[in-house]
Structure formats: C-alpha cells, structure tokens
Amino acid sequence: LMVQEELFEILWHDTQCRIRAEGVNELTVNKHLKDVQQYTFQHLTHYDHAYTEHEHQPKKRFEELAALIWIHLLLRDEDIVDDHMRRLALYIEAQYNNIVKHTPDDYFWEGRIAWVDLPEFNGMRD
C-alpha cells in the first residue's frame, strides 16, 4: 500500500508539472489534475476488472484488454489497426505475467523488475 501511495504521489506531482508546462492558467491546474485523476482511475479500474472478472478465462481477458486499450489509450479511434490493439494487449498480459508470476517478491519490493521488451509495430495488418 505504501509503494502504491508513493507511486501515485510521484505521478500526480509529475502530472501537475506537465500541466503547468503546457501553459495552463495556474487557477485551473487543480481542475485539470482532477480530470486526469478521474481518467486514470477509470482506466486502472478497467484493468482490475479484466484481471479479476476474467482471471481464469485468458481469451475473454485478452478481449477485455484490447477493448480497454481502444477505449482508454487509443480514445476509440476507428482508424486504428486491430493488430495494434492485439500487440499492446499481448504486451500488457506479458508484463502482468512477468511481474505476478516470475518476479520474486523481494525483487518486487526492491523495485528490481526486469521489464518485458516493448512490442514491435512493424508489418502490422488489419
């Protein structure tokens, strides 16, 4: 819980700095931060749903991951190639398995995580 709280504190501070860097009126920085926090929590809650609701249904979980990528990351862009969503969903699933199933607890708590390589986006097909 402490790691999670610290992570979000760093994220929100960084987000405030990025909002200010965009030249947003200082009086509206907190409003914009609140909007970003709302989007972020909806996005993360969607991941929680995918991994708890479909824990033992990998195909359904994969479909849910692809849907949440299209909704939250690709902003429902109709022109996105399906292969793009599939590769991102595979990456998220691989990262999840890497952290949950393959990273020893003491490595996790020390922040020593060997991240999975990013997917290749060459030769995508629809």
Image (cartoon, rainbow, N blue to C red):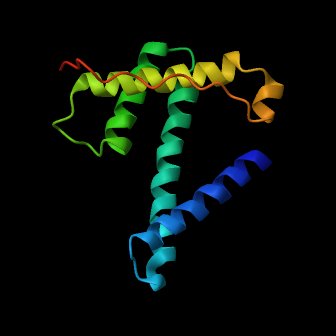
Question: For the C terminus, which image quadrant?
Answer: top left
In the rendered image, the vertical position of residue 18 relative to residue 111, given as above or below: below
Observer-nearest of 1 and 81: 81
Q: Position of residue 83 (x, y in %)?
A: 27, 21
In the rendered image, is residue 1 in sight? Answer: no
| Residue at the farthest bottom position | 27
Q: Position of residue 57 (x, y in %)?
A: 50, 14
Q: Position of residue 65 (x, y in %)?
A: 42, 29
Left or right of 52 in this view: 70: left
Left or right of 45 in this view: 63: left
Observer-nearest of 97 and 56: 97
Please identify the quarter of the rendering in which residue 21 is found: bottom left
In the rendered image, the vertical position of residue 124 relative to residue 68, given as above or below: above
**Could you tell me which residue is drawn at 43 percent across and 20 percent down?**
90
**Could you tell me which residue is drawn at 83 percent across and 27 percent down?**
106
Left or right of 112 in this view: 30: left
Q: Position of residue 5 (x, y in %)?
A: 72, 53
How many numbered circles does the render carry?
A: 0
**Could you tell me which residue is drawn at 69 percent across and 16 percent down?**
102
Please identify the quarter of the rendering in which residue 68 is found: top left
In the rendered image, is residue 106 in sight? Answer: yes
Observer-nearest of 125 and 22: 22
